[in-house]
Image (tube, helix red, strand yellow):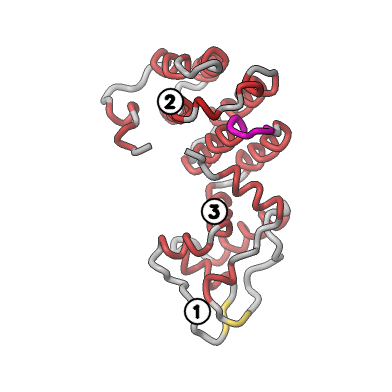
Amino acid sequence: MAESENPLESTPAETTIELVAIALQAVPVAGGILSGTATFFLDRRKNERLKKFLVNLAEDLNQVQEKVNSDFIKGDEFRDLTEDIFSKASETRQQEKLDALRAVFLNTVLSKKPKYDEAEEITTLIYNWQSRHIVLIKILSDPLTADKQRGNIVGHGGGLTTSIEEMLLKLLPDWDSDQIERTWKDLYDKAINKTPGTKGNMSDKGIHQLEGRLTEFGLKVAQYLTNPI
């Protein structure tokens, strides 16, 4: 969805809680649970970030309503998922994390076999992370696309040696070595990536050397973080 299509961006006045509730109420089958849960958290935390998150979620769900797992949304686990993600979103300030929480919600309700425990584990990780953790996972899930989006700054290499740190410094010019190493270590400690550090030298074969760094669990997390819309 283009940003210009977002009703929160197109109206000069702050979006009201009532407007958010109406948007969610319009979602087929699940509207009542979504609207009631949203109103509870909006009454506690009146902020535009949460309202925007909820309206965007409603719009996404309306786009994919025919693919939503109707059996799942009729059960208790759907209610638990809604409360968990709305609660975490209400306490989240970073847009990257809000987008990630929305993606987890959508991927869960669109799954043929939703796994609530798995979704809960990943939303907890997102809540405890900073945006930089999500950014790095997305790069590692598709290094070639990440490099292409940045003008093929790593490319096919060509130097004698390189390191993971050196490649990431090119891909993330606003980061310093400490941010890269700490973020990488955090993901390694959570079994997201396979390599314990970023500073070891290797032959410079370019961006392909960032491929295959995610564990099986890391690939699963990356899939949950990808908005299916």
**Residue 174, located in which quarter of the rendered image?**
bottom left
**Left of 115 or right of it: where is 209?**
left
The residue where tag 2 is placed is 55
- Is 46 situated above or below 136? above
Task: State the extent of the magenta-drawn residues as a range.
Answer: 108-114
Q: Is residue 154 magenta?
A: no
Q: Amino acid at mark 2?
A: Val
The residue where tag 3 is placed is 138
Element under label 2?
Answer: helix
**Residue 129, located in which quarter of the rendered image?**
top right
- Distance from Cα at disc 3 to Cα at disc 2: 24 Å
- Distance from Cα at disc 2 to Cα at disc 1: 44 Å
* Label 1: few (<14), some (14–19) or many (≥20) C-alpha neighbours in 10 Å: some
From the top left corner, tell me how far across and down residue 228 is, in percent. Answer: 51, 40
From the top left corner, tell me how far across and down residue 161 is, in percent. Answer: 57, 83
Residue drawn at x 51%, y 85% is 159
From the top left corner, tell me how far across and down residue 58 is, in percent. Answer: 46, 25
- Is 112 situated above or below 139? above
Q: Amino acid at mark 3?
A: Lys
The residue where tag 1 is placed is 157
